[in-house]
Image: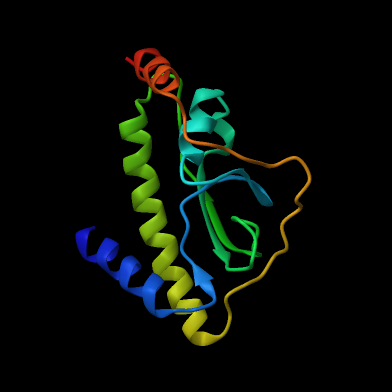
Amino acid sequence: MWRRARLICATKRSSPGYVFCTTILAYPRPAYRNVHCDFWALYRRDFENVGVSIIHLDPGIDSGDVALQGRVEVSAGDSIFKVKARLAQLAADLALEALAQAREGTLPRQPQDSGDSGFYRTPTARQLMELFLRSR
């Protein structure tokens, strides 16, 4: 897994036009946008929308066309740490798949429906503690 993580970072720097972004998804588009997207889905108990999206870059924030997506299983008793480990593995797997497809020129593009998805800010210390205590 460490080798995959290093590969993702190197690819992100050297491949203009693509972003390998861990995010939360609601097929067919990411529902929670920003770096803390996994937190907000778990905080809201929106377990159906926890996953990873690989998106194409555009001028917006997490608004590019979706290339690949996948979900992870989450249950009410899972800690955020368990979920993040599953997301990291899924992100690595999808990033490798995206690299292969980009190399072959077959990486898909599916426009996002910008409808009701939102941009989520950094959680407060209180919100972080609430989620931590809930998952114990």
Q: Position of residue 125 (x, y in %)?
A: 39, 22
Q: Is residue 45 above or below residue 116?
A: above
Residue at the image point whose x is 66% and y is 70% from the top: 109
Work out whether 9 lies above or below 91: below
| Rendering quarter of residue 6 | bottom left
Any part of residue 73 in sight: no
Q: Residue furthest bottom?
A: 104
Residue at x 56% of width, y 23% of height = 44
Horizontally, residue 79 falls left or right of residue 22, namely left
Q: Which quarter shows the C terminus?
A: top left
Q: Is residue 6 left or right of residue 77?
A: left
Which residue of the protein is positioned furthest toward the left in this rendering? 2
- Residue 63 visible in the shown view: yes
Residue nearest the viewer, comparing 72 with 60: 60
Instruction: Judge by depth and name the residue closer to the eye, 97 or 131.
Output: 131
State the image coordinates of residue 32 (x, y, percent, origin top left): 59, 41
